[in-house]
Amino acid sequence: MPAPTIRRATPEDAEALSRIGAETFSETFGHLYPPQDLRDFLESAYGLEKTRRDLADRAKAAWLVEADGEVVGHAMAGACDLPHDEVTPTCGELKRLYLLKRLQGDGTGSRLLAEAFAWLERDGPRRLWIGVWSENHGAQRLYARMGFEKVGEYEFIVGQTRDREFILRRG
């Protein structure tokens, strides 16, 4: 089987990006939330209109991962909006990076991460930020190997659930 392909998402990809966003978030974290809270969150974070706005925003970029004609992952990057005193308008943020579980561990995630970071630093190095769930130890180890360090925490809210999220920074 050929390696999955990664390509920049366009406005015409809004439905596919919306769908894979909701699917991968649910697959990864859906078990943590009451069903109605999860549905409401997915609509606000990955709904079609929100996705269309994200794709139209020139300060953001999104990518799709495709395997055998199926969208199996995505990433999004843009200006940083994490709640930290040292965030400035010049900071960039990896906002999302998800693959379906069956594709994890084959190097595709690292390729997708490299695409997002290259876009974020297309005009030269700058401070990069990532929010990561406090219990996602694998992602924390990966980001630490890439030079990110924990510099803060905040609450990631899904309905009545408040997840402890770490703020990571590089640069």
Image (cartoon, helix red, strand yellow):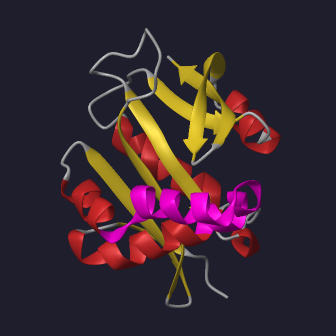
Q: Please, is residue 83 above or below residue 71 in the view? A: above
* Towards the viewer: 111 or 44: 44
Magenta segment range?
Answer: 24-48
Which residue sits at x=61%, y=77%?
3
For the N terminus, the image quarter is: bottom right
Residue 34 painted magenta: yes
Please, which residue is most extreme toward the top here?
A: 85
Residue 168 at x, y = what percent? 60, 25
Residue 73 visible somewhere in the drawing: no
Residue 137 at x, y = what percent? 81, 38
Residue 50 at x, y = what percent? 31, 59
Count of all numbered marks drawn on residues in the image: 0
In the drawing, does residue 149 fall left or right of residue 123? right
Which residue sits at x=35%, y=44%?
119
Q: Please, is residue 86 above or below residue 22 in the view? A: above
Which residue sits at x=46%, y=43%?
95
Give the main secondary structure of the magenta stretch: helix
